[in-house]
Image (cartoon, rainbow, N blue to C red):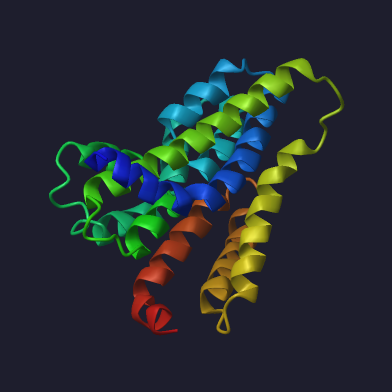
Amino acid sequence: MGTKQKALRAAFPHTLPICAGFLFLGISYGFLMVTKGFSPVYPIFMSMFIFAGSMEFVTVNLLLSAFNPIYAFFLTLMVNARHIFYGISMLEKYKGTGLKKLYLIFGMCDESFSINCSTLIPSSIDKGWFMFFVTLLNHIYWVAGATLGAVIGSFIKFNTEGIDFVLTCLFFVIFLEQWLGSKRHISAVIGVLSTVICLFVFGSGGFIIPSMAMILVLFTLLRKKVERQ
């Protein structure tokens, strides 16, 4: 068996739980885009070239609102700021992966980072190809889900009022899961308090970027304390 085949066989089982989640969320995303009046081509190609799940949901409203590239830039930066820390922590891991590093950087999402960072790769498996296939498989799952949702949405017609609430539900479930899975809640408290404060100060129309910036600053300042807990 070749190096690539061995790496693919080793990576595939680690991505199966991600497959279930990505297919469901991808279908929701593709369906949402179509119900908002976009051609199925939009979610298909956006899932290929953006590949940032939460930001892709946010992009739906950005495309439907007034053209404001500066706001879109800073919102994207704040939503995906965690990838700065992901990237720094993976510098050593990605050494010696050759040209595969370019795709590993592009395709690094929360789930791929978690698998590639924590998995003990057997010495008989090429680590570069293992991480490549983890990233590629997760990417394929997301694109497949978005494509399926877009196709279904273009054929099924019914009242979709309120479907865009799926993003709110997604973040709430993630928050609840993190809260229940941790004994200390300093990260959650920082997030909630920062958001509430900025909501009162800046109002419902402009609180997102300031709250994300405030959370990023507080996490940076309290990083050692958060890591210890």
- In the image, 132 versus 9, the foreground residue is 9
The answer, for residue 68, to whether it is visible in the render is no
On screen, residue 19 versus residue 151, left or right, reads left
Q: Which image quarter holds the N terminus?
A: top left
Quarter holding residue 64: top right
Asked if 97 appears above or below 152 in the picture, the reply is: below
Which residue is located at x 35 percent, y 69 percent? Answer: 220
Which residue is located at x 42 percent, y 79 percent? Answer: 226
Which residue is located at x 23 percent, y 42 percent? Answer: 3
Q: Residue furthest front?
A: 1
Residue 167 position in % (x across, y down) = 66, 46
Residue 100 position in % (x across, y down) = 22, 38
Asked if 217 appears above or below 49 in the picture, the reply is: below
- In the image, 142 versus 190, the foreground residue is 142
- In the image, 58 versus 213, the foreground residue is 58
Residue 195 position in % (x across, y down) = 59, 62
The answer, for residue 146, to whether it is visible in the render is yes
